Image (cartoon, coloured by chain):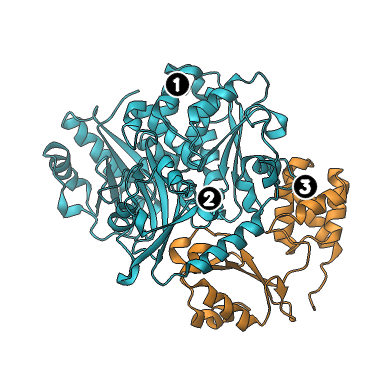
Chain colours: A cyan, B orange
Amino acid sequence: MTYFRSHVLVCVDPACLKKGAHEITDALQDEFVAQGLIDEIQVLETSRIGGCDNGPEIMVYPEGVHYVGFTPDDVPYLVEEHFLKGRVATKFVQQEKTFVDEELSDPTSKEVRVVLKNCGKIDPENIEDYLAEGGYEGLGKVLTSYTPEETIDIVLRSGLGGRGGAGFPTGKKWQFCRATQDWPKYMICNADEGDPGAFMNRRVLEGDPHAVIEGMIIGAYSTGSNQGYIYCRAEYPLAIKTLNIAIDQARALGLLGKDILGSGFDFDLEVRMGAGAFVCGEETALMASIEGNRGEPRPRPPFPAVKGLFGKPSNVNNVETYANVPQIIINGPEWYAAFGTEKSKGTKTFALAGDVQHTGLIEVPFGLTLREIIFDVGGGIKDGKAFKAIQTGGPMGGCLPADYLDLPVDYQELAKAGSIMGSGGLVVMDEDTCMVDIARFFMDFVQDESCGKCRNS
Amino acid sequence: MTIEPKDSKVVLEAVQSAVKRYGASQDELIPILNDVNREIGYLPGEALDELSRLLKVPKSQLFSVASFYRMLSTKPRGKHVLQFCESAPCHVAGGREVWLAVKEALKIEENETTPDGKWTLVTTSCLGVCGVGPVMMIDDDVIGNVDPAQVPAILAKYH
């Protein structure tokens, strides 16, 4: 595979075409040839870079510089400034941001974006945008260079744990499913993000669906599965739409279906929509729902890796877990394991909600303290009020008061403090919150949504 | 309640076209029920009868599934369905006051339909847009940052 140091995306939407987008592409190609840069820089035509108001428009990656409003005559100047002298040609930079993303702002200094790397930066309905960011390179690497066992070993060494909340080593789960001698096997993505206050997975599905799909294909190759399901809650209609578009585009390029990338490996994928049931986020209930039954949990064992969907071996991971996988393959397990704490490796996305200044999504390495998350990343409490508590782990988690602000956030420390990691919703409460009311509120929720099987566990 | 019963032809057609879309198999049941519920507004007994015939699944089992999921309804619903998010982030952000304002404006309680058949009021689990709580959803529109005082004006937009 050829590696380019830069990619230049030229917008070829109708509005930009009218303003001569193809001529810009040609001029860029010619200039890169003339300067001897053509082997280092790739020019791609794509759609929807900005609003097309000041077209033609180009986007230069990896820097992410957005140039607008120039002509083919300006191209030599632009190439000289940006690609030879290495400075931004400010004259043509798109000035104002066309749209403010309130849910996902630029990362603060304490954040590390692995899962959220592409969210808000690429067009999720255009697979070429994902490809330009190195998308499906991980899959290509796995299919051409690694056996399923080697792939599982990489995931094991990365320390990736299940991001749905339990943190169980993903590589181990894949090993169990691979070891079961029964076919067919199913690869399932749990996109039933039901914890109140958690919306990280929604954003990943809406903003970077191919990362999840690529992770699933790699997982399917590792476990020996040829059919996958993404079970997405019905409360997320946009995520379902985006996923379906992404699956069609991946299939059209031969990344899903028969003989993927000429490797002889077959895998296809289907989206299943829920119908509103919190308990379907539990994996056995989720599988019952895919089968067309009431979403009621079954006792384990047997575990899904042995007897899951339709009574066959199944592997269930959540959206965030799968989205990590392509990055781990591309950058190596050591790179991933370098983030985080001794026992909790890597990064975690969180949704900050409640009485915090900056609500929205963040992604941090494990080990940051609650104080750093709330005050440095989240900007502190709204309206200058005092912090009272933070709920981690959803309704079955816990509320940690100010005494715990210096607690490093990882699976083990949260458990020691009597709470849980859960899927990643963080609800911040200020001094005016009544904790008795909150306790009653969560008990109501848990009572209402309980599957009534607790006696079995 | 003055909600007009749906024409049985319309009901049968909705069921048949959904079954055709997904295939007559039990593991397609949730997608089929979702589509019929959306089309008709709820799942009338006739729809389950027809589905039972086409899928060869007992009606009792279909009813058990249809009554399990919150977004499926076996009872008629109003022209507009207002789903109110009752989750913690919305609650912390002042959701209770909005909830009281909604009940006051519609003069009904949870899971009730207004006598003119215009509104049905239900609660929903988290809609995942917690950054803009309190949140409610009217039909397919998500409305965030709702203030109790705005409620009558929001409702007035729906005819």
- How many marks do you count on the picture? 3
Q: Quadrant location of the C terminus of chain A?
A: top right
Figure check: A442 above or below A112: below
Question: Pointer 3: what residue?
Answer: B19
Answer with left or right where residue A221 lies relative to residue A401. Answer: right
Circle 3: element type: helix
Query: Which amino acid type corresponds to the residue marked 2 in the rendered image?
Result: Ala
Q: Nearer the viewer, residue A431 or A227?
A: A431
Chain of the residue that carries numbered disc 1 in the rendered image: A
Question: Pointer 1: what residue?
Answer: A153
Q: Earlier in the sequence, mark 1 or mark 2?
A: 1
Chain of the residue that carries numbered disc 3 in the rendered image: B
Q: Quadrant location of the N terminus of chain A?
A: top left
Circle 1: element type: helix
Q: Which label lies toward us, 1 or 3?
A: 1
Q: Nearer the viewer, residue B51 or B71?
A: B71
Question: Pointer 2: what residue?
Answer: A239
Q: Residues within 10 Å of mark 2 (few under 14, many from 20)?
A: many
Q: Which label lies toward us, 3 or 2?
A: 2
Is residue A224 among what the camera can see?
Answer: no
Q: Position of residue A236 (x, y in %)?
A: 56, 54
Chain of the residue that carries numbered disc 2 in the rendered image: A
Marks 3 and 2 sit apart, C-alpha to C-alpha, by 24 Å
The reply to whether the C-beta atoms of the residues labelled 1 and 3 are less than 8 Å apart is no
Is residue B74 among what the camera can see?
Answer: yes
Q: Position of residue B151 (x, y in %)?
A: 54, 80
Query: Which amino acid type corresponds to the residue marked 3 in the rendered image?
Result: Val
Answer with left or right where residue B83 lies relative to residue A389. Answer: right
Query: Which amino acid type corresponds to the residue marked 1 in the rendered image?
Result: Asp
Circle 2: element type: helix
